[in-house]
Every structure is written in structure tokens, then in C-alpha cells.
Amino acid sequence: MTPTNNNQQLKHKEFANDVIIPEIARLLDEGHSVTLTLRGISMRPFLEDGRDKAILTKPSKPVRVGDVVLAEVLPRRYALHRIVKIDGNLITMRGDGNLATEQFDASKVLGIARCFYRKGCKRPDYTTGWKWRIYSAVWTALLPVRRYLLFAYRMTLKLKHK
């Protein structure tokens, strides 16, 4: 909830994905954009749990390989991951921090990420911007060694939190 004046406090409330995502899908279908605080570690190392936010909209054109989409990958199971392959109506996506993939029908795409607010920054990283495109190209090309890079990243995080 957002305060209407300076005397009110900002309230934070969390909902289970299977409760909130259908409402997000409805808002996207109505033409609204939605700001979603990211949960989970599947998009590491670029996007972090609870820290970063995605701005989602309904796709205005067919999604492409490289797009980050919110989709229902199984009944009542949702993921925000990068598309790695499209074969007709079958979409395959993978979280940047994952090695495994998910497949689903293209009709299950609920929204597309247009930008991300990362590390508390006030300016978004747009998915059409040079920073995001370079990161995406490099990170997806590193798939064969991603396991080792993610291990090193996790070890660095553990050392920081000691």
C-alpha cells in the first residue's frame, strides 16, 4: 500500500504466488504495468531476492529468445525467467541462476519485463538498454561454465554475510 500523505506509514504485505499472480495477470490484461518485487534466487547473479523489482507489461508483440517473461510453467506455478528457445508454441526458459529449464505453451506468458530496479537504484535498467543487452549476451554465452561461476558467486555472498 502506498501512503496518501506523510503521516501514514508504508505497509508491506506478502502474498503467495498462486494468490497474487492471477491478480497481476488480470491487471496486465487490462493494460496496466505492474511493479513486482522479485522473490527467489533463480535470476542470480544480476537480480536478487527481495532486493530488486521488475516492471511488467503485457507483451505488445510476440515474445523472443532473450526476453524475460512471467509465465505459468505448471498449473499454479509461476516463474520470471529468460526465454532460451521458441519452437512453435512451445517456449523454453531458464533462470539466469539455474541450469535446468522449464517448457510451457506460449499462451501461458502473462507478462514481459520492460525494466528492472536493481540494488536500490532510482533509475531502472531497461531490457532494451545497452547494459542489459550486454549482460544478457555475455551471461547466456557462459552457460557451459555457469555452474562454476554461480558457485563462486554463492561463496562470495557467504563470505560477505559472515
Image: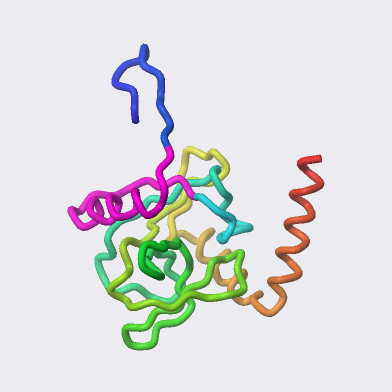
* Figure quadrant of residue 88: bottom left
Q: Which residues are magenta?
A: 14-38
- Where residue 131 sits in the image (x, y, percent)? 54, 58
Q: Residue most toward the bottom?
A: 88
Q: Quadrant of the N terminus?
A: top left
Dividing the picture into quadrants, the one containing residue 4 is top left
Number of callouts: 0
* Residue at (27, 50) in percent of width and height: 23
Q: Is residue 159 magenta?
A: no
Along the line of sight, which residue is nearer the eye, 30 or 137? Answer: 30
Q: Residue at x 74, y 49 (%)?
A: 157
Work out whether residue 82 or residue 21 is closer to the camera in this orientation and state it.
Answer: 21
Q: Quadrant of the C terminus?
A: top right
Residue 132: image location, x then y, percent = 51, 60
Picture coordinates of residue 58 (x, y %)?
Answer: 27, 60
- The answer to whether residue 153 is above or below residue 138 is above
**Above-or-below relation of 160 to 109:** above
Q: Is residue 15 magenta?
A: yes
Q: Is residue 4 left or right of residue 92?
A: left
Q: Residue drawn at (29%, 55%), measured in percent from left and top?
A: 22
* Residue occupying the point 43% across, 55% down: 126
Left or right for 82, reference 30: right
Q: Quadrant of the rendered structure where residue 85 is?
A: bottom left
The figure's colour scheme reads rainbow
Instruction: Find residue 125 and report its horizontal and vertical position in percent.
Output: 48, 52
In this picture, residue 112 sits left or right of residue 142: left
